[in-house]
Amino acid sequence: MMGDVRDDGMDGVTDDVTKGAAMHGAPGLAAPGLAAPSVGTPMDRVDGRLKVTGGARYTAEMPVPNVAYAVMVTSTIPSGRVRAVDIAAAEKAPGVLAVLTPANAPRLPAPPRPAGGQPAPPAQRVPSLLQDD
């Protein structure tokens, strides 16, 4: 029948989640055994109207003084070896602070090896950017 409200059997689950979250100090939830005021009730969003009308300012729109941007240039060859990189033109470009290559990038710490000194299995390996083998 149209308009019937059906029991989805989730009431107990919702109560358990609410109680568990309240026990762990989740904000906006009541103590165990009490109704949670924010669960299942509409809440006004202070910035809602600004967001939907395009008037809200987001973090990415905030000015940051002296910011530097990075651009990663990757290989167009999926499985190859870089034998040489000519960075002279990039270093001379206006505004460039540094050009990092595998030859001049700071070394990242090696991932820890399991007992026995053997390399980690492939599923546990961590890729390192700008590093040679």
Image (spheres, rainbow, N blue to C red):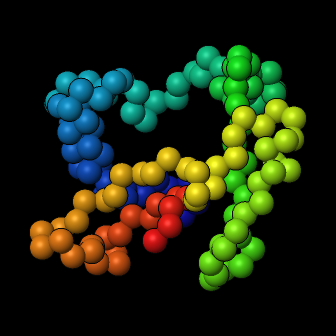
**64 and 113: which is toward the camera:** 113
> Residue furthest toward the bottom?
79
| In-image side of 28 versus 12 (left or right) | right
Q: Residue at x 62, y 82 (%)?
A: 79
Picture layout, residue 50 above or below residue 110:
above
Residue at 31% of width from left, 59% of height from top?
111
Q: Is residue 92 visible?
A: yes
Q: Is residue 122 above or below residue 87?
A: below
Q: Nearer the viewer, residue 74 or 101?
A: 101
Question: In the image, what residue occupies the spot 20% across and 32% down?
Answer: 24
In depth, the one of 112 and 86 nearer the eye is 86
Count the labels in the image. 0
Res 50 visible: no
Residue 5: x %, y % from top left:
46, 53
Q: Is residue 103 left or right of residue 74?
A: left
Which corner quadrant of the image does residue 32 belong to?
Answer: top left
